[in-house]
Image (cartoon, rainbow, N blue to C red):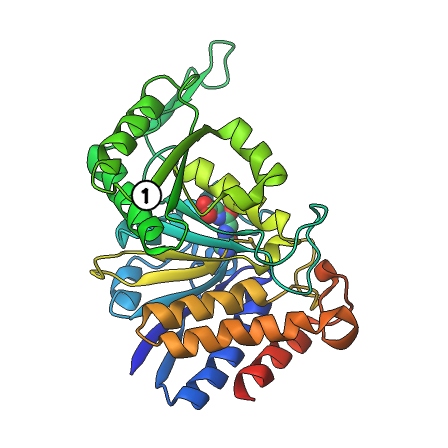
């Protein structure tokens, strides 16, 4: 039996998570899996409105014993400032559960036209490996002389040797396991002249253990241009916390919609539960209207099944997504972001049926 903590969170997370569970239940029936869902209402701005904080003091005890966390989205800026909701929930999970890998696949799927002219499935198929516990997302900083004309604010980036090496090792291992064996490192080491050259140095050092992996490095600015111009160049792209976050929105945007993009926040040592969340956020502009595309959430379910040791079931979920997408917007229930008029639950139901078939 796998015990999974389910946190829908805010906005469209409340609509996409039930579709993810619908599909995972279909996979559980088909592959005779025993998946237990434990629902939690915290890590949401509704919880904050009632309790004045994003999570209860004993949140770690409540969910730490689970095998994984299935997460929707966080953020409702009308109620809680975004930095308060993020630092009070998702970033706590990543740090306290040492989920130092944020693995974000980016793949052009059948049936969804890429905004990049002439691209077809197979042309875009890479992973962004994002460092997830330090870097630019640091809590080191402060404000001085607040409200005066001498006001100063600063926030430091933090790169530890252990933190840098462990994310690079994960990325090199992943690259080595793939046919292309190609790793791209993203920095900005001409302008950011201490931390980023340090990252580059650690890449050179790590590469010595992976003679069969082709390594290249890009400055982040030209790398974003090459994502758009030559996405077929990339296989595994490793980057710091902030750069990885940006690249993993841009990559899926090149595949037609960021709503299909999943991510896994992984503690590779399995000392703590890993967390599976779509790349997209809570999307307040469309929340509550049944317009959200649930594929990112459902694809997270596929990654979670694989992580839990059910690779066949995980693969079946991904195949079901591809099968529905292949049919195209005229024959399958596509949500508006993919050129259709179907609802979140229409699309979730179609994918669940494809899993069961
Ligand atoms: N799907 C999770 C979510 O709501 N993400 C919103 C977000 O802004 N995340 C920031 C981050 O991943 O660092």
The answer to whether 75 is drawn above or below residue 70 in the figure is above
Helix, strand or loop at mark 1: loop
- Where residue 232 appears, as percent x and y from the top left, is 55, 46
Instruction: Report the residue at 45% width, 29% height from top.
Output: 218
Q: Residue furthest top?
A: 150
Residue 323 in view (yes/no): yes
For the question of whether residue 53 can be seen, the reply is: no
Residue 343 or residue 314, whichever sits in front: 314
Mark 1: give few (<14), some (14-19) or many (20+) Cα within 10 Å.
some
Horizontally, residue 80 falls left or right of residue 346, namely left
In the picture, measured across the screen, residue 271 lies left or right of residue 245, that is: left
Up the image or down, 341 lies above or below 54; here it is: below
The residue carrying mark 1 is 213
Which residue is at 70% across, 65% downward?
291
Residue 286 in percent (x, y) is at: 69, 58
Horizontal and vertical percent for residue 49? 50, 56
């Amino acid at each position: 039996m796998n015990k999974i903590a389910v946190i829908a969170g805010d906005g469209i997370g409340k609509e996409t998570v039930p579709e993810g569970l619908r599909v995972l239940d279909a996979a559980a029936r088909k592959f005779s899996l025993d998946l237990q869902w434990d629902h939690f209402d915290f890590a949401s701005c509704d919880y904050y409105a009632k309790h004045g904080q994003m999570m209860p003091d004993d949140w770690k005890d409540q969910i730490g014993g689970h095998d994984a966390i299935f997460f929707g989205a966080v953020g409702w800026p009308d109620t809680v400032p975004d930095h308060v909701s993020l630092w009070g929930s998702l970033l706590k999970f990543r740090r306290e559960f040492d989920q130092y890998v944020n693995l974000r696949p980016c793949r052009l799927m059948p049936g969804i036209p890429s905004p990049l002219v002439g691209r077809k499935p197979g042309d875009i198929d890479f992973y962004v490996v994002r460092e997830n516990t330090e870097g630019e997302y640091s809590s080191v900083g402060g404000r001085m002389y607040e409200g005066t004309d001498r006001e100063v604010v600063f926030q430091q980036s933090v790169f530890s040797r252990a933190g840098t090496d462990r994310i690079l090792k994960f990325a090199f291992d992943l690259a080595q396991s793939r046919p292309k064996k190609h790793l791209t490192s993203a920095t900005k080491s001409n302008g950011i002249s201490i931390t980023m050259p340090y990252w580059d140095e650690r890449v050179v050092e790590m590469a010595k253990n992976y003679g069969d992996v082709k390594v290249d490095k890009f400055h982040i600015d030209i790398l974003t241009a090459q994502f758009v111009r030559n996405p077929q160049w990339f296989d595994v792209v490793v980057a710091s916390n902030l750069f990885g976050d940006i690249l993993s929105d841009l990559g899926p945007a090149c595949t037609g919609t960021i709503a299909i993009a999943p991510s896994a926040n992984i503690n590779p040592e399995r000392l703590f539960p890993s967390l599976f969340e779509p790349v997209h956020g809570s999307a307040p502009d469309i929340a509550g209207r049944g317009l959200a595309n649930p594929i990112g959430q459902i694809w997270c379910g596929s990654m979670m099944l694989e992580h839990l040791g059910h690779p066949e079931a995980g693969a079946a979920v991904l195949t079901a997504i591809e099968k529905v997408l292949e049919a195209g917007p005229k024959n399958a229930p596509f949500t508006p972001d993919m050129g259709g008029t179907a609802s979140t639950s229409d699309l979730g139901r179609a994918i669940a049926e494809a899993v069961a078939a």
